[in-house]
Structure formats: C-alpha cells, structure tokens
C-alpha cells in the first residue's frame, strides 16, 4: 500500500523550494519560475498560502498550489493559482489533495467562494475541478497586459 501524498504549507523560501518551482513551473506554462527572492515575497505575503505536495517515499516536492485569500468590499474571496503536479507524479491524487487542502483553508478563512481558471487543454485538471464541485461561470474573463509604457519612470 502506498503512503498518501503529504500536503504542507511553505513557511519559508528555501533553495529546495526554488529548485522545485524551477522544475514544476515549466510543466505548467512558459512563465519564468520565481527565484529565491521572489519566493520569499510570495511565501511572506499574508494573502498567500503556498501548498506543497511531498512524495512520502522520496520526500521530494511533486506539486504545488498557491491559495490567495483577501477581503474585498463585498466578501472574503479566494483564488487558486498555479496548480502544477510533476509529470512523473500525475494520476496519484496529488492535484486533488492540493485542491482539497486549498478549499479547506479558504473555508477556514471565511471565503465566500473560491475561483480558479484552467486552460481547456488541461482536460484531467478540468475533470478534477468539476468533480470537486467547481462550476463553470457564465462570465467574461479579461486580461490587460501591463507594458513598460504603463509604468512610472524610475
């Protein structure tokens, strides 16, 4: 019998954490993985909880999820961001364990809802989210990409 995946919240940015993000983020997107300094900011932010999935056999980080919880004028809201499971660990319940813990923490913190987005091509992830009770919203999602021209001069 295999041991269950262990989910823990990151309490500090470490070289091990930076290496894990360096390996995992490219499996999610073309974004540049955060370096140690950026991870320090992310982990230290009171709005963020970085959840880490550890393989019990190797002790290696095999997945991550970032939960963002904040108060806005209408409610306490939560977002799940950057869920990624190492390709070698997929199909073992890592994504589900991470998401369930994110949902538990969001509820514990008083969130009225939990939002997330997932590309249609991530079919297994979309099936998981629907199975866990997420429903597709009838809304438009807009993105504005900030350019250098938008930033104030240095």
Image (cartoon, rainbow, N blue to C red):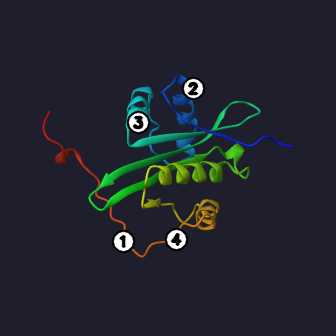
Residue beneath label 4, please? 135
In the image, what residue occupies the spot 44% across and 49% down? 109
- Residue 84 rendering spot, x and y as whole percentages: 57, 47
Among the two numbered marks 2 and 4 on one chain, the one whose residue lies closer to the N terminus: 2
Looking at the image, do the residues carrying marks 3 and 1 touch, with CB atoms under 8 Å apart? no
Q: Mark 1 touching mark 2, by CB under 8 A?
A: no
Residue under numbered circle 3: 42
Spatial separation of the CA atoms under disc 1 and disc 2:
38 Å
Return the mark for residue 16.
2
Q: Mark 2 or 3 closer to N-term? A: 2
Percent from the top left, x then y, of residue 37?
39, 27
Distance of mark 4 from mark 3, alpha carbons?
28 Å
The earlier-in-sequence mark between 3 and 1 is 3
Q: Earlier in the sequence, mark 1 or mark 2?
A: 2
In the image, is 123 to the left or to the right of 5?
left
Tell me: residue 56, above or below residue 103. Answer: above
Q: Tell me residue 30's x, y (percent).
A: 48, 46
The residue at the far right in this view is 1
3D distance between C-alphas at marks 3 and 1: 28 Å
- Observer-nearest residue: 52 or 33? 52
Question: Which residue of the protein is positioned furthest toward the left in this rendering?
Answer: 153
Mark 3 vs mark 1: in front: 3
Quick one: label 4, few (<14), some, or many (20+) residues within 10 Å? Answer: few
Q: Dot 3 lies on which element?
A: helix
Which one is closest to the eye, mark 2 or mark 4? 4
Q: Secondary structure at mark 1?
A: loop
Where does label 1 land, which residue? 140
Q: CA–CA distance between discs 4 and 1?
A: 15 Å
């Amino acid at each position: 019998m295999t041991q269950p995946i262990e989910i823990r919240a990151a309490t500090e940015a470490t070289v091990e954490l930076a290496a894990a993000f360096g390996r995992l983020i490219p499996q999610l997107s073309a974004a540049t993985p955060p370096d140690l300094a950026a991870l320090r900011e992310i982990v230290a932010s009171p709005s963020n909880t970085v959840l880490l999935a550890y393989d019990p056999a190797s002790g290696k980080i095999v997945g991550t999820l970032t939960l963002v919880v904040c108060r806005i004028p209408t409610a306490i809201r939560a977002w799940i961001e950057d869920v990624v499971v190492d390709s070698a660990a997929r199909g073992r319940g890592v994504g589900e364990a991470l998401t369930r813990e994110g949902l538990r923490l969001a509820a514990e913190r008083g969130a009225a809802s939990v939002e997330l987005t997932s590309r249609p091509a991530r079919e297994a992830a979309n099936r998981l989210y629907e199975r866990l009770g997420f429903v597709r919203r009838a809304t438009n999602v807009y993105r504005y990409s900030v350019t250098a021209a938008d930033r104030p001069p240095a």
